Amino acid sequence: MNEPIISAHAVQHVYQRKTVLNQISLDVPEGAVLGLVGRNGAGKSTLLRNLVGLTVPDKGFCKLDGCLSTDLSDSVRERLGYVAQTPDLFDWLTGDAHFERIGSLYARWDQAHAYALAAQLDLPLHTKAKDLSLGDQQKLSVVLALGHDPDILILDEPVASLDPMTRRAFMRALFEQRGSESPRTVIISSHLLTDLERVVTHVAFMREGRIQLMDEWDALTEHLRLVQVKGAETPLGGIFQSRQPEHGRWLVDTRLPGAPFDGRALNLDDLFLELNA
Amino acid sequence: MKAGARRVSGLTTESPAVPTKGRWRRTPEALVWMWLLVFMITLLCAIFSYSAPAEFAFLLCTLSSLAAVCVTHAGLRDVHTFVKRVVPVHQVSQRMHDMAHGWWVTGLLLGLATLMGAWVSFLAAFDSHPSELGVVLLLALVWHAVWVCAVYAWWGVAHPAHLAVPLLGGLLTVFWPGPVLGAWQHAPLWVWLLAAAYGLGAGVWQLRRQLTPTRSALTWLPGPGGRLDAWARRLVARAGFIEQGDLARRPWSAIFGLGVTFALLPIQQIGSIRMLEPWGSEITYYELWRIGFLCLFLLPVLRSSQWHWRYWLSPGGQMRRQLGLNLITSTLRFVAMWFCPGWAMFYGAKQFFFSDQSGLQILTHLALYLPVMAVDFWVATALAVCLMGAFKTWWRLLFTCVLLFSPVVLIGMTQVDNRWAWLQHWGHRQGVWLIVMTLVALMLTILAQRIWRKADLAQVWREYEAKTQTLQG
């Protein structure tokens, strides 16, 4: 495995006396596409804001490319793209004015690429941001994050307001051929699990400020099984019991010794339901 | 062809709002013809007008319409237009906006010049030469319009040319002061007018350039002239012209938000209490109240040169450890460049028109305010930055209430017990006060730095935006 390019170390964040992030540690290798999955309020957005340095954790720290997130160097900022949960645009500027304004800050900004992306996503560029629909605002936010061809991309529910066709175009844009030599590392938080399943290499499930489960997606699909047991016994290799114990369902990791292989394989949707039911 | 584009008169316009039927379509080409028609009509009116003011007004319209032709035409001259056969309608309208904006600034500068002239008793001179003033104005307008065209049509050529003229003039004056000054003294009126128009047009053009956002130094390597230009732009940008961009393009509501602060101008003196005090004045129990009010007025003006998380995350963005200081210095620069001159003009005009003081006396009094204003605004800004970063809304409200009611509390204390009588008079604004206030300001600045090092930037930004919108609403 490559050295982690994005990492969080025992991050704890308390907001209004509620622990939003509870001792979260995370390592994302270079080139990985990590899907961050969890229910509303699980702490996904806070974690992502911590990773880019917009929020400071009460304990622990985050690093991007070896640089503390709260003190990012210009070279890391140049390689970072971030899409927030809300578009947060300059309301009084049009799309192309946004390109001028934000593009001027990045040495690697490619105006032609940004225009091509905008055309691909069918984004109107001569309308002020405040007059755009929420979906178009989200598209503009996405194009602004991708315009400088970042190596590290952190996306907080970027496709929540997009229609299925635009979502597909967005995913294509995300993983199209790039000029850069280094592979792009992506963390994407989304509730659209079917879309996510197609693109992720890693998945992390969050619940109540903790990471419940994180692994390569291929490994999870290959080794994780849902088994039915009778009574209160814990099956060998059992890692997680269904939230409703009376059902007697367990998630089993078949890599553990003695674990049964006869369980049901799960897709991302099933796994999310099992972990959050 | 792009979606939403349509072919008009052999060219294609990007604007979907352009009507396809009718003789007077609002295309750039139609605009050119329209301006030419206006030009001819106003020229005829100017020729056949009977009174001098009417002639002047028509001539102004004539030259304006001619300049508008140039500007509209400049919009059609882009390579974009000829290669792709696409007329960028929004760019043409942008140029028109630029020109109108430039003229507005010209008018403002002339207004200021007239006001200053009145102050130093040159009003009579202005009154006796209205026609010369009119000619300078017209020349400046046309000159500015030509510049706008030149900038858009031939990038980079106009700027060095316009820099070279004052540079050459300056060098000539330095090396041969006698002949140059002598030549100026004996120069005919039209040379003076031309120079004045050039200076005015160049000033406006340069100011507009400063207002336009530019690429940061990271993306290109400018030459010495470019570096100087970039430095000047940064200076202006940091002075608060640019708050998430140029102020000129912000919604009116944002500008009204700033107006809350500028309300200090007319109400700076409420009865016997002054919001701004001169050096040597007495410190009373209203001191906390005064600082609290200044702090309140500064809250909607708080700014950073990069007040948006998109700037914070971009290269060259602020490091967290400098954020508190950046907020304080950016706000103070804005206050120094906008509020203080505005207040000085207001104060000067008030003294000039409503007292018997001479210009020199007014200037002396203004100078006495300077050191006190510097420290007062520093303390108030640092306090506002701490408040914005540290507390929730209701804490801020409580804090404000405490400050506002402090005079009542202090008076009450002095009434209850004579031992507190000293609270009514805290001495005078002199050396000790200056040292104490500077220490307070320093402590607040350090505190602000610590607070903003931990602030949730995304949250704070949204909250501030929402807050200002509420205030403006």
Image (spheres, helix red, strand yellow):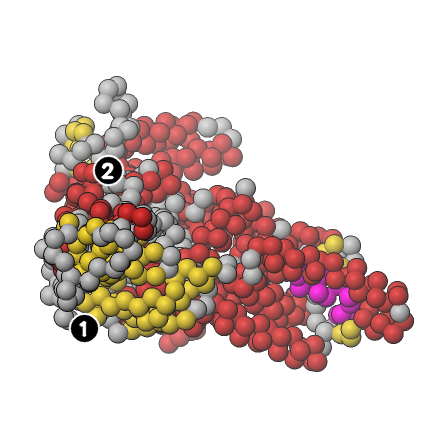
Give the residue at mark 2. A163
Q: Can marks 2 and 1 be said to lie on one chain?
A: yes
Magenta stretch holds residue B3 = no
Helix, strand, or loop for circle 2? loop
Q: Chain of mark 1?
A: A
- Report the magenta residues as a range: B281-294
Q: Chain of mark 2?
A: A
Query: Quadrant where the C terminus of chain B lies?
Result: top right
Helix, strand, or loop for circle 1? loop
Label ID, residue A3: 1
Q: Quadrant of residue A133?
A: top left
Specify whether A180 is left or right of A138: left
Residue type at the position of mark 1: Glu
Magenta stretch holds residue B289 = yes
Identity of the residue drawn at 18% across and 29% down: B6
Residue type at the position of mark 2: Asp
